[in-house]
Amino acid sequence: WRLYDDPALDRLIERALAANTDLRVARANLLRAQAVVREARAGRLPSAGDLSGGVSYGDDNRGNPAMAGGGAQWSANGALTVDWEVDLFGRIGRAIEAARADAAAEQAVRDSVALTVAAETARSYVDACALAESVAVGRESVAIAEREYAMQQARLRAGAASGLDAERAATALANTRAALPTLEGRRRAALFELAALIGVTPSEVPAEAQQCVRAPAPLAAIPVGDGRALLARRPDVREAERRLAADTARIGVATAELYPRISLGGSGNFFRNDQVRGDDSFSFSLGPLISWSLPNLVTGRARIEQAEAGAQASLARFDGAVLTALKEVEQALSRYAAEGERNARLREAERHADAAYRLAERRYRAGSIAFLELLDTQRDLLGARATLADSTQQLGSLRIDLFKALGGGWRAGA
């Protein structure tokens, strides 16, 4: 949206990004996925199995002649066991890979939501500005119709015009005025939509949006780029690719469950009382540990097949996302180019209609043409202006569609 170089639009989009509830949900989901990554990475670290300790007082040596004579005494004990899994078959590594891919997918979801929020905020702002421009054009048209109506009333009173001409002028004026309420209603609706997007009530529409009277246009060419850059930039494509990566990694996790887990374990113990002191108070052990929960091979194979099927589905979704992205860009480019050409032709038609109206007005005042011909040129001018204003509003909206299709974020994508 910074291609518009419009500080008011920049501020509105920043407010929308801060206030949008869907974006807050997406951020929270991303934080959760990142926490899952940290949990998966912790599997590479040694873990403390058991930690215990205590202090007691009493005579525990009665009935043990070798340690008799001590009487009641204080005793202290402690124990710690530590184990570290050797990721020989890649279970932990593939789990970390899947968690990272899930987190990247959630980040793409967040980017997609942010892109939609920014695009719809820009659309509401541009629509409000374009419709304000249409309202201004409508009021100019009303002024033209009022001038013609006043002239016909004066000519009617002077006996130089017929009542038919006066009624035709009144009809043209009424029709021109009738178009204004619709335009003003559409402008207010765009402003209310903008208010909702930035998280305020309809009565709190920002003044900078209400005061905008001309639709902004980009100051630079839209950086369409190539297909490869597009696919790397589109959030939905990135999400689909990361989901595919996560599901592929889960195949490795399911496969590793068929093999034993090898761990290096160690333990240390401490016990001290009046008879047990010094080096005799400590003991330790260290060695490898192999644990293998003999799996039900049918169940294990079924889980691998489930993971493989999930990866195939993710691959299909990824292929679909790529095709959809390319289709949407081509459609958006086609519509935008067609409307741009139409808008240029309408501007040319509006210039010719304006020139024809001014010429007809001078000839009518000179008595060279009838009022009906003047009314026709006036109708052509007002229609050309209204059509041009509507095309300008559509062109602005189609430009937003193109931004969305391209994925936005060209600076980040570079």
Image (cartoon, grey):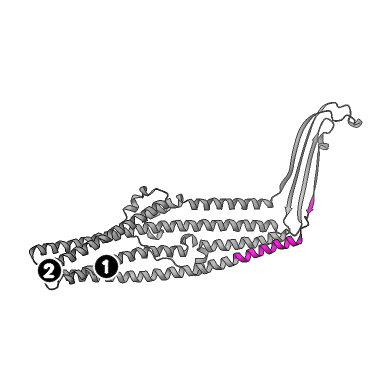
Closest to the observer: 319 or 234?
Answer: 319
Q: Residue at x 29, y 61 (%)?
A: 134
* The quarter of the displayed image where residue 183 is located: bottom left
Can residue 7 be seen here? The reply is: no
Q: Residue furthest right?
A: 65
* The quarter of the displayed image where residue 378 is located: bottom left
Numbered disc total:
2
The x and y percentages for residue 122 are: 40, 58
**Mark 1 / mark 2, whichever is N-terminal:** 2
Instruction: Identify the mark at residue 383; answer none if there is no mark.
Output: 1
- The residue under label 1 is which amino acid type? Gly
The x and y percentages for residue 9 are: 38, 55
Predominant SS along the magenta part: helix
Q: Residue at x 70, y 57 (%)?
A: 91
Q: Say whether residue 89 is left or right of residue 106.
A: right
The x and y percentages for residue 292 are: 78, 55
Relative vertical location of residue 247 with respect to residue 377 in this rendering, above or below? above
In what element is the residue under mark 1? helix
Closest to the observer: 261 or 319?
Answer: 319
**Which contiguous range is marked in magenta?**
286-314
The x and y percentages for residue 201 are: 39, 48
Can residue 195 be seen here? The reply is: yes
Q: Is residue 289 magenta?
A: yes
Instruction: Identify the mark at residue 365; answer none if there is no mark.
Output: 2
In what element is the residue under mark 2? helix
Q: Say whether residue 203 is left or right of residue 249.
A: left
Q: Say whether residue 57 is left or right of residue 350.
A: right
- The residue under label 2 is which amino acid type? Arg
